Amino acid sequence: MRRSSHDSPAVKLLRWGVGTLGELLITIGVLLLLFVTWQLWWTDVAANREQADAIHALERGFAQAGPPERAIADADAPARPKEVAALTKVPFGEAFAIVRIPRFGAGYARPVLEGTDHDTLTRGVAHYPGTALPGRTGNFAMAGHRTTYGRPFSAIDLLRKGDVIVVETKASYLVYAVDRHVIVTPDHVEVIAPVPQRPGARPSRAWLTMTACHPKFSASQRYVVFARLVKNIPRSSGLPASVMAVPAGAVG
Amino acid sequence: MYGPLWRALPGPWQVKALLCLALFAGVVAACFLWLFPAIATYMPFNGNAVQTGLQLPAPATFDTAAT
């Protein structure tokens, strides 16, 4: 742009105005690109790191010798006096379990935290407060991101009937097997009812529900997977390797 | 907009360019650490408009189920 000292004040003002507007638009464009970069890439980087740290902390805590002070008692097993004190409530935002899903890869492990607010959902898989605890009769319901923030449930649509979902607590390994899935709008709260999709019904067995957004990068629907408890293995017995066998066609 | 900034920076153009880079890095860091996490809460695709998770076991919706 050639500037001339002969330009009238009006032309100078116009030039200044157009130039500033252009710089402003470029700035807004750069900021929007930065936001997309942050949302699609950086949240994964940060959340994966934070969630891996949480897994390590949980594993250390679970492995500590001595009577577990805050572990979840088996609901159906006979009382084992020295085993665990029943957990009746988990403080909001606290990680209390590890979920492992062989279909999502042999090394797949994510922390489960209490509460489903935005912040908790960025730190792992979120347990719906008020729903059953792992292994208990009722519905252990959890939500997870399908995209961004480490996307713990990104491959939820690959789960097939019979696929294993292991929820590891200080007391035991709760082994669930996938039963079915549904796709619903977000107001269908009956998917996390004690008996999934049968609100008001009295539960007689232990269910697990996973919810994630659907379709990807949208919040218009929910992809929901139901699973039933098939095994309750005390931690002292160890988790059989066969349980964690990665099914054919798994993602990783 | 950026003209006055460029003129305000001291030193030869190489120093000015370095300072500009540093300023830009600072703005990016501020966005990533504070601005974006704060506004992400309001993004519709994050599906967290209503914190119904706190009101279980009798919620009206479960919008908090994440994307």
Image (cartoon, rainbow, N blue to C red):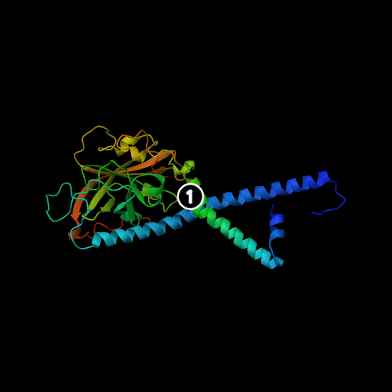
- B35 and A43: which is toward the camera: B35
The residue that appears at 37% across and 52% down in the rendered structure is A124
Q: Quadrant of the N terminus of chain A?
A: bottom right
Classify residue B26 as left or right of residue A86: right
From the image, tell me which residue sits under label 1.
B37
Q: Residue furthest right?
A: A6
Q: In the figure, B40 relative to B28: above or below?
A: above
Whether residue A182 is visible to the viewer of this picture, yes or no, is no
Amino acid on which the number 1 mark rests in the picture: Pro
Q: Name the secondary structure under disc 1.
A: helix
Classify residue A8 as left or right of residue A21: right
Whether residue A111 is visible to the viewer of this picture, yes or no, is yes
Q: In the figure, B52 relative to B36: above or below?
A: above
Local crowd size for mark 1, using a 10 Å CA cut-off: few (<14), some (14–19), many (≥20): some
- A40 and A32: which is toward the camera: A32
> What percent of the width, then of the height, locates residue A183?
37, 39
> What percent of the width, then of the height, locates residue B20?
64, 61
In the rendered picture of this protein, how many numbered marks are placed on residues?
1
Chain under disc 1:
B
Q: Quadrant of the C terminus of chain A?
A: bottom left
Residue A118 found in image quarter: top left
> What percent of the width, then of the height, locates residue B49?
44, 39
> What percent of the width, then of the height, locates residue B3?
72, 55
